[in-house]
Amino acid sequence: MEIIERITGIILPVFAIIAIGYGYARWRGEVVRSDMASVNRVSMEVLAPLMVFSALAAKDFDLVHNGWLILASALISLGSGLLAWPVARLFGYDKRTFLPPMMYNNGGNMGVPLMLLAFGPESLSAAVALFTAATFIYFSLGVKMLQHGRDTRPGSLLRLFKSPIMIAMVLGVLFAVFHVPLPSPIFSAMKLLGEASIPIMLFALGVRMMDISFKSWHIGLIGAATCPLVGLIVAFLLDQVLPLTAGQRGQMYLFAALPPAVLCFMVAEQYRQEPDKVASIVLMGNLAAVVFVPLGLWMGLPASIR
């Protein structure tokens, strides 16, 4: 019961910010949508990259110790996309709309605080490791999937790796591996700016709710169930073969049960890939976390404790 209260305590502020964004858009009307284009660009090109970099460059992050979790996160992302593929075909969804949110869950603004609540402050390094690997998969393979069928020219993959988030990730990993120190005031400023991306993305999601039609709720419900279920299936398979500690095992299952990331909506908006449907998937998925996150925690507990 305590974990339910903790999850609810994290999810309720998320929906409160979304509701504020929606209310503001209703009040101000169409002008808000055009204004948010610039805000979204700043979020994707400055704030979100700083969030990724500051998480990786933090002193608590240990790349080597979390090697198996990094592998597990990458395989959960890839395996989730593979298992969700027939679901998209069954319901006739555009794969560019449905698959990327299934591959990239809310390991940042929901996963990190939940990990800390469930496993204590020492789990921060594991939470960052899981989030990092999934982010790399999404901003390489996932974004490449979004580009499929569009006007892409030779060298587009190289340009993808020049994106601000990918650059921030590479630099963050280098800082973590070589333990490069940053002056405390500079690091604090980067961390503050990075943390600002989370409420801004949620606010933008609320604005986008203005465009959600009744038809979008169908894909939202299917996506809300598919994302954690395929993640947990892959985690169960990995549990049989990876040499994880008891703590890492629980962290992997919790990560696999998380809903689609809010960032998926921002990227869909950027690529104009049915952002209203992706918004519905994200919205319904985060609501469904009240059910699936406790399931992931239960699956990650040792059999003697269940």
Image: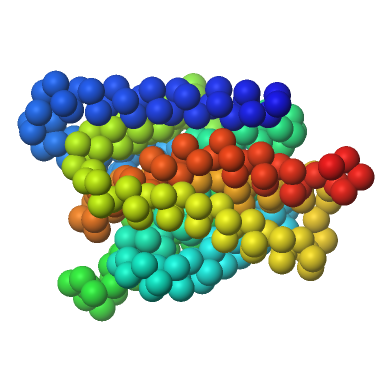
Whole-percent x and y of residue 199? Answer: 38, 28
The answer to which quarter of the image holds residue 80 is: bottom right
**Quadrant location, the N terminus:** top right
Q: Which of 24 and 216 is in front in this view?
A: 216
Q: Where does the image place residue 106, in percent across and percent down from the top left?
A: 50, 44
Q: Can residue 265 be seen in this view?
A: no
- State the residue at coordinates (36%, 67%): 91
Instruction: State the quadrant of the C terminus.
Output: top right
Indicate left or right for 23 with 122 as reference: left
Q: In which quarter of the image is residue 29?
A: top left
Left or right, 237 with respect to 133, comes to right
Residue 12 seen in render: yes
Query: From the viewer's perspective, is residue 243 above or below residue 255?
Result: below
80 shown above or below 283: below
Q: Which of 172 and 252 is in front in this view?
A: 252
- Residue closer to the observer: 236 or 201: 236
**Display colour scheme:** rainbow
Q: Could you say which is closer to the camera, residue 305 or residue 127?
A: 305
In the picture as drawn, the residue positioned furthest to the bottom comes out as 154
Residue drawn where x is 60% and y is 44% of the image: 292
Q: Where is residue 116 in the image (x, y as percent from the top left)?
A: 67, 31
Q: Position of residue 184 (x, y in %)?
A: 54, 24
Residue located 87% across and 49% down the image: 303
> Residue at coordinates 58% horizontally, 56% vertically from top-left?
229
Q: In this view, does 199 lie to the left or right of 102?
A: left
Number of marks in the image?
0
